[in-house]
Amino acid sequence: MPSTDYGRQPDDGFDRYDISLNATANSTLPPIINGVEVFLLLPTTGVATVVQDASAITAVRDKYRVKKNWMGDPCMPRKFAWDGLSCNYAISGPPTVKSLNLSSMGLSGNISSSFGDLKGLQYLDLSRNNLTGSIPDTLSQLSSLTLLDLTGNRLTGEIPSMLLKRSQDGFLTLRYNNNPELCSNGNSCVPPKKKSNSMVPVYVAIPIVVVLVILLLLVLLICMRRRRQGTASNSIKPQNETRFTPPHSWDRNRDSSLQLNNQRFTYEEIMVITNNFQRVIGQGGFGKVYDGFLENGTQVAVKLRSESSAQGVQEFLVEAQTLAKIHHKNLVTMIGYCNDREHLALVYEYMSEGALHEHLRGRHYDTTLTWAQRLRIAQESAQGLEYLHKGCNPPLIHRDVKTSNILLNANLEAKIADFGLLKAFNYDDDTHVSTARLVGTHGYIAPEYLTTLQVTNKTDVYSFGVVLLEIVTGQPRILNNPEPSSITKWVQERLSQGK
């Protein structure tokens, strides 16, 4: 018969307990046991979520009636943190809410002001809901916020100017498309006036329209002339995309001038940001990548050029100018740069989940990516690559597409990184670009490029195909079985065998 033994007070005098099973007097078989449950009391004082964050997220839960496992403490115990929520677990203090994903949850009503009380919030996804009303100014006060996704709601009114400025400055990825009545320009928020039955406005409007048409033609002529002169303008768009015309100096060679609109840091400031280069989070051909924090608490990644780096000043200029000019949700965003005498560094958004290859075979391999996650990562990487090929004028070729150059943020959103080997077509009728030397990573290089040293956008497409094979199979680009063999050959052999 099942039974339960328990003690009302924990016994601290023993670290071992012996359990004996004795057969009953009328039993003809030896005793058996089919399960044991042991419960221990664990102290939880001092480890609960920060009170302000716990109160704020509870208010959000109550307002929207979130139907998840949102009970108890939001962040503790760590293994039972609330779904859609991730936390920062500091060694010396209680946890705080870091990211919140409420996408496609059927939320309705206005955006809760309680979100503004989550001072450590870095990522907020409210996309694909039925939210209405205006965007509260309290979201502008979240200094750590690096991603705000409001796509696919019914929001109205004007976007707070501080949010737009942070987005334009590269500190915030702001997504707000598919909100028809939401605007970023005060004039476009003014509702149209009602029609009048009087014919007087018609007589007044005709000469005004004529004047406006003439002015419009003049503006178009000026824009066309400026475009021929290579002038480019950056403007925020709902899709966070900007068409890009690279400077002619790239194709002429060795222009060491660096004229960027992004924030410029001194080497001393870079040392402060990285806490004297304390924590290395990556390394590539350019040099080491360090973890850092800006004055406002925003976490960043700092790529510092090593003196022994094979990539020189020209590659640094290419990557810096590229990230300063192009903007897409699936390309890593540059926040600033350092060009202080011999010290060269790039400061860009922090991608907390590292590179894709670390999730396929590296330090994150213990948390296997689901098929849905792999498909989304492949799709988002393809969108970033398509923007380089088709959204930029002239088209840009990455030339080093690989799983280590696809980075993931806290929501496992993929962004392409490392533009040091970027190459641009010079003219519209170019079919390829010839290079003096072979660049790229072994295993990702297209066979045609190996033999001709001529690159096209198909060169990137081949490399991306290798990336897809790695995502699907989990195998590295070069296998040893037992001789070194490329993943493309490995896949072809199995297909020929019907596997």
Image (cartoon, rainbow, N blue to C red):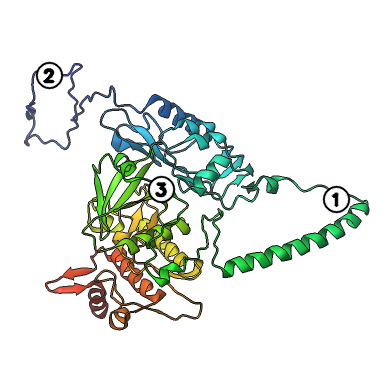
Q: Seen in the image, is 211 located left or right of residue 166?
A: right
Residue at position x 49%, y 47% in the image: 169
Q: Secondary structure at mark 2?
A: loop
Asked whether residue 259 appears in the rendered view, the answer is: yes
Mark 3 surroundings: few (<14), some (14-19) or many (≥20) residues within 10 A: some
Q: Which residue is mark 2?
A: 12
| Residue kind at label 2, given as amino acid type | Asp
Mark 2 surroundings: few (<14), some (14-19) or many (≥20) residues within 10 A: few
73 or 442: which is nearer to us?
442
Q: Which residue is mark 3?
A: 264
497 or 490: which is nearer to us?
490
| Residue kind at label 1, given as amino acid type | Lys
Asked whether residue 352 appears in the rendered view, the answer is: no
Image vertical order of residue 95 relative to residue 263, above or below: above
Image vertical order of residue 224 relative to residue 325, above or below: below
Residue 322 image offset from top left, x and y in percent: 42, 61
How far is the residue under mark 3 from the one under mark 2?
Answer: 60 Å
| Residue kind at label 3, given as amino acid type | Arg
How far is the residue under mark 3 from the one under mark 1?
Answer: 52 Å
Q: Tag 1 or tag 3, which sits nearer the N-term? A: 1
Residue 195 is labelled as: 1
Q: Seen in the image, is 316 located left or right of residue 8?
A: right
